[in-house]
Structure formats: structure tokens, C-alpha cells
Image: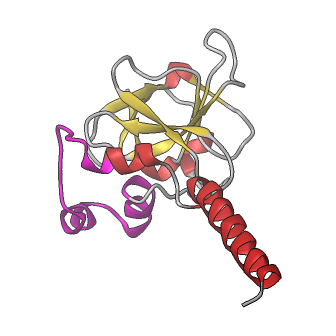
């Protein structure tokens, strides 16, 4: 192999390795999510146990960090008094007093019930977002953004399938 071919081959390989390393943090997801998978929660179940209590769509969203299609949740348009609980473990997460119409197609809230949620960094799909989880079972609920109304300025954009509404 001559020097020119050697340099072209090693340069291509190096660029490919650097590019793959850089992109992997965005395509594969985030290391925080991997840590969450090993974290101990009050309620711990195997995938098979979760599949027995959740619908396939709930399992995909809550346990596999999926997202439901915008505008598909009936909870998006509910504004009666009540509490929104985790669909996996029944932990109260949000009250109707903090719900607002964000126009995004997902149920949105400006403040969770204190101590109900945890967050982690989500670097999947070429962006960095703050992912919201149920603190009791670790279920993926949605994401939180800094474009919500007063008094918090937060928009907790939740997957309706990860919640259940309990009227008061």
C-alpha cells in the first residue's frame, strides 16, 4: 500500500470513528436513561410483570421511553377537578389546578405534585431535553420545557397514556 492510500484509509477511518462517537450520544439515547434502568425504585417489576398490568401502548411509553402521537390522548381536553396519577403505579403526579392548554396535543401542566417526579437528561434524536419520570416506579411520563405559563414558567408535556385521571 502506498503512502497516499494509507493516509486516505486512516483518515476515513478516523473521521468515521469520531463521527460515530459524536452521533452515538444522540442516536442511542442518553447514559442517564441507562442508569435509570439500574436504579432501584419503590416498585420494581420485570418486563413480563409490567406487560401483565399495562396495555401495549402504556408499556411502550412508560417502560421503553416511547412517545404517543400528539392529539391522541383523551386526557388532553379534560379540565374537570381531579388528580392525574401514574398509569403504572397510581402515584398522584399532577392536579387539575396546574393543567393548561399548551396547544401541543399532549396534556400539559405547569407544576407537579411535590416529590412525585424525577428528571434526567435525554440526548436522543439529536436534541437535549429533560425527561420526566415517576419517582416511585421510574415510568417515563414525558418531558419538561421552559416555555410554560406563570408562576413556574415550566411546561410538563406528558404522554396521556402514561397517566390516568381520577376526578375529585
Q: Quadrant of residue 110?
A: top right
Q: Please tell me whether residue 129 is drawn above or below residue 24 in the rendered image.
A: above
User: Residue shown at 78%/80% (left/top)?
Assistant: 3
Q: Is residue 63 left or right of residue 151?
A: left
x 57%, y 53%: residue: 25
Above/below status of 31 relative to 168? below
Residue 69 shows up from this direction: no
Q: Vertical placement of 128 versus 81: above or below? A: below
* Image quarter hosting the N terminus: bottom right
In the image, residue 41 above or below residue 61: above
Q: Position of residue 143 (x, y in %)?
A: 56, 39
**Closer to the camera in the image, 120 or 71:** 120
Q: Check if residue 140 falls in the magenta segment.
A: no
Q: Residue 152 location in percent, x, y? A: 61, 13
Residues drawn in magenta: 37-63
**Residue 9, image x and y in percent?**
72, 79
The residue lying at 49 percent from left, 49 percent from top is: 30
Q: Which quarter of the rendered picture does the C terminus lie within?
A: top left
Amino acid at each position: 500500500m502506498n503512502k497516499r492510500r494509507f493516509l486516505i484509509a486512516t483518515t476515513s477511518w478516523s473521521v468515521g470513528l469520531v463521527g460515530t462517537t459524536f452521533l452515538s450520544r444522540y442516536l442511542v439515547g442518553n447514559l442517564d436513561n441507562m442508569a435509570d434502568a439500574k436504579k432501584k425504585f419503590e416498585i420494581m417489576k420485570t418486563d413480563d410483570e409490567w406487560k401483565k398490568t399495562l396495555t401495549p401502548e402504556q408499556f411502550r411509553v412508560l417502560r421503553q421511553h416511547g412517545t404517543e402521537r400528539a392529539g391522541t390522548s383523551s386526557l388532553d381536553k379534560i379540565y374537570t377537578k381531579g388528580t392525574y396519577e401514574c398509569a403504572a403505579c397510581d402515584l398522584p403526579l399532577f392536579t387539575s389546578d396546574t393543567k393548561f392548554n399548551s396547544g401541543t396535543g399532549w396534556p400539559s401542566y405547569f407544576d407537579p405534585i411535590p416529590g412525585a417526579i424525577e428528571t434526567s437528561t435525554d440526548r436522543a434524536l439529536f436534541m437535549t431535553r429533560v425527561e420526566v419520570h415517576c419517582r416511585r416506579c421510574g415510568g417515563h411520563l414525558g418531558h419538561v420545557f421552559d416555555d410554560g405559563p406563570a408562576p413556574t414558567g415550566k411546561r410538563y408535556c406528558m404522554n396521556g397514556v402514561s397517566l390516568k385521571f381520577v376526578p375529585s
